Image: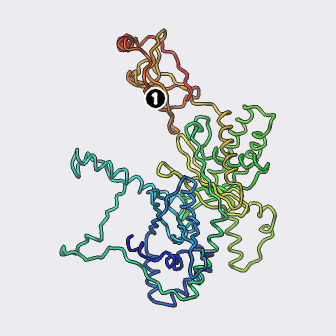
């Protein structure tokens, strides 16, 4: 790092070879071949980069907010510095956009410690990168926990916390041969030097300027909705993914009055070499939802029914796509085969329907778990939005980007739609405790008593109670009208009673009889 600081910044930018990876594939491939042919040293340096598992990008930049953070992870920053040379001003790009190598999976770490992953999509899908990020995140937490338990149980104890990653990792720096002698592998960082022909330096400058246009035209905005999440959606008998998909379509309709083509990738990992199939959210039921929801003359009940019908239809289509019953990939493969074999392309592929299907205004994808705060990508058409989302138990995270469109305004419309959806859904707000429960396990109030011990509950997961399960004398059961099984988290609060009444509280609890009725307490979340 200290050696990097000593390098002239202007020279570093002019030799930022990674900027060429932002060019169209054929152009970068041609320039790369020229670079290889010009010097065997260049070929060796590129081989080192190609064989690496990933690229670590250390940015001397700290984002001011989450919007800047996700933009930096997506495409880097655009920052122009003005320098005077020989009496003339020269504008130089000093943003983090030049500190990237987009052909590789990149781990990006900012000056404030925030980190993200940027990956080339043609090689892997989002869930592959998610698995990697999740393991790294989980291993970090487990390593910290192990450092604590090791002081109690000792290193290697069966009672200690197990590793997340089971791979047998051998550090090259301390590797030994069969005789136990150090292998002498030098693992210290090395600077990769390139011999740059003049035309390659020119192409780097042109690529940086072109990439600057792309960044300057890009708008990225993060919506972090925290009023409800997966738990509330599941409680209203809807798929969280279908719910989020419909929220984005309705938000667009509320702004423009149009139902547009919306794409969602569905994993087909059940098949050998399977990757994804396309799910199209704009079904007939989804279009009906857009019209019903934005109408001034429909009731809450009608809006909820339309939402549930559209969500149900979406879930059916997702299952069909996952089962290999989609049409997009199959039709596209036929088109590619016809072109490759110089066959006449069927008129179908010139139809308005095919063109509309492949002009994806809302390109969306669900990829996330507690390891990620945001997940996103760019739009796939000039007038479109790229929307990545993460569904959490108590919130929904959207990362939205576009080119020359009102990204923030769309995010505002989406936020409004989510709030309106909340108004028509049924809140998860009722709890009943079995007669043989522990006092601290739920919200309890004995009749004719002013004592209240705790409040607040939170539902998790999509669990169903076993029909044969019966509450014991020390368990709390939660009753709901739909008979779903949920777990409750109870949070204690400070008592408002006087010290004298608090002294009597224990006696009142002890006098509670198992056969005495306990009233149901309604609580708003």
Secondary element at tag 1: loop
> Looking at the rendering, which quadrant does residue 87 occupy?
bottom right
- The picture places residue 409, in percent across and down from the top left corner, at 70, 50
Assign the N terminus to one quadrant of the image.
Answer: bottom left
Binning the other alpha carbons within 10 Å of mark 1 as few (below 14), some (14 to 19) or many (20 upward) gives few
Residue at image location 55% in from the left, 28% down from the top: 483
Residue at image location 60% in from the left, 60% down from the top: 377
Tell whether 322 sits left or right of 56. Answer: right
> Looking at the rendering, which quadrant does residue 502 occupy?
top left
* Number of marks in the rendered image: 1
Assign the C terminus to one quadrant of the image.
Answer: top right
Viewer-closest of 325 and 220: 220
Residue at image location 43% in from the left, 78% down from the top: 48
Vertical arrangement, residue 102 with respect to residue 471, above or below: below
Viewer-closest of 498 and 449: 498
Query: What's the coloring here?
Result: rainbow
Tell whether 218 sits left or right of 375. Answer: right
Vertical arrangement, residue 111 with respect to residue 28, above or below: above
Q: Which residue is mark 1?
A: 468
Tell whether 30 sits left or right of 5. Answer: right
- The picture places residue 267, in percent across and down from the top left corner, at 57, 57
- The picture places residue 321, in percent across and down from the top left corner, at 63, 55
Residue at image location 41% in from the left, 19% down from the top: 436
- The picture places residue 75, in percent across and down from the top left corner, at 57, 65
- Give the residue at the far top of this rendering: 448
């Amino acid at each position: 790092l200290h050696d990097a600081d000593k390098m002239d910044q202007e020279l570093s930018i002019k030799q930022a070879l990674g900027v060429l990876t932002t060019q169209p594939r054929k152009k970068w491939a041609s320039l790369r071949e020229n670079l290889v042919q010009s010097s065997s040293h260049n070929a060796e340096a590129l081989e080192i980069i190609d064989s690496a598992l990933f690229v670590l990008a250390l940015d001397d930049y700290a984002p001011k907010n989450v919007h800047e953070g996700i933009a930096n992870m997506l495409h880097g920053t655009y920052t122009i510095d003005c320098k005077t040379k020989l009496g003339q001003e020269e504008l130089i790009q000093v943003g983090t956009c030049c500190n990237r190598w987009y052909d590789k999976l990149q781990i990006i770490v900012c000056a404030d410690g925030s980190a993200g992953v940027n990956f080339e999509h043609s090689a892997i899908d989002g869930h592959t990168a998610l698995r990697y990020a999740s393991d790294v995140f989980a291993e970090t937490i487990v390593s910290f926990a192990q450092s604590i338990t090791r002081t109690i149980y000792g290193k290697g104890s069966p009672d200690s916390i197990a590793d997340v990653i089971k791979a047998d990792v051998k550090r090259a720096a301390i590797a030994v041969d069969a005789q136990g002698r150090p292998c002498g592998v030098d693992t210290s960082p090395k600077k990769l030097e390139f011999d740059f022909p003049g035309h390659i330096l020119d192409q780097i400058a042109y690529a940086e300027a072109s990439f600057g246009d792309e960044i300057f035209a890009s708008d990225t905005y993060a919506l972090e909705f925290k009023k409800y999440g997966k738990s509330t959606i599941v409680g209203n008998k809807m798929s969280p993914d279908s719910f989020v998909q419909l929220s984005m379509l309705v938000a667009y309709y509320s702004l423009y009055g149009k139902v547009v083509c919306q794409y969602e990738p569905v994993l087909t990992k059940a098949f050998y070499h399977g990757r994804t199939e396309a799910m199209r959210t704009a079904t007939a039921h989804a279009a009906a939802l857009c019209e019903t929801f934005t109408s001034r003359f429909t009731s809450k009940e009608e809006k909820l029914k339309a939402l549930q019908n559209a969500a149900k239809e979406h879930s059916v289509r997702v299952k069909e796509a996952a089962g290999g019953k989609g049409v997009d990939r199959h039709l596209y493969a036929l088109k590619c085969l016809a072109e490759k074999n110089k066959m006449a392309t069927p008129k179908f592929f010139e139809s308005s329907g095919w063109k509309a299907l492949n002009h994806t205004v809302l390109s969306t994808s669900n990829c996330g778990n507690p390891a990620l705060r945001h997940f996103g990508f760019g739009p796939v058409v000039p007038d479109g939005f790229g929307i990545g989302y993460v569904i959490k138990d108590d919130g929904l995270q959207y990362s939205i980007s576009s080119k020359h469109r009102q990204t923030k305004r769309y995010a505002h419309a989406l936020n409004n739609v989510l709030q309106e959806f909340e108004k028509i859904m049924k809140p998860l707000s009722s709890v009943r405790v079995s007669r043989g429960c522990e006092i601290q396990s739920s919200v309890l109030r004995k009749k004719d008593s002013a004592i209240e011990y705790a409040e607040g509950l939170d539902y998790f997961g999509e669990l169903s109670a076993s029909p044969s399960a019966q509450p014991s004398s020390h368990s709390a059961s939660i009753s709901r009208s739909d008979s779903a099984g949920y777990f409750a988290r109870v949070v204690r609060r400070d008592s408002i009673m006087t010290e004298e009444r608090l002294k009597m509280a224990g006696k009142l609890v002890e006098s509670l009889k198992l056969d005495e009725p306990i009233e149901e307490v309604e609580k708003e979340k």
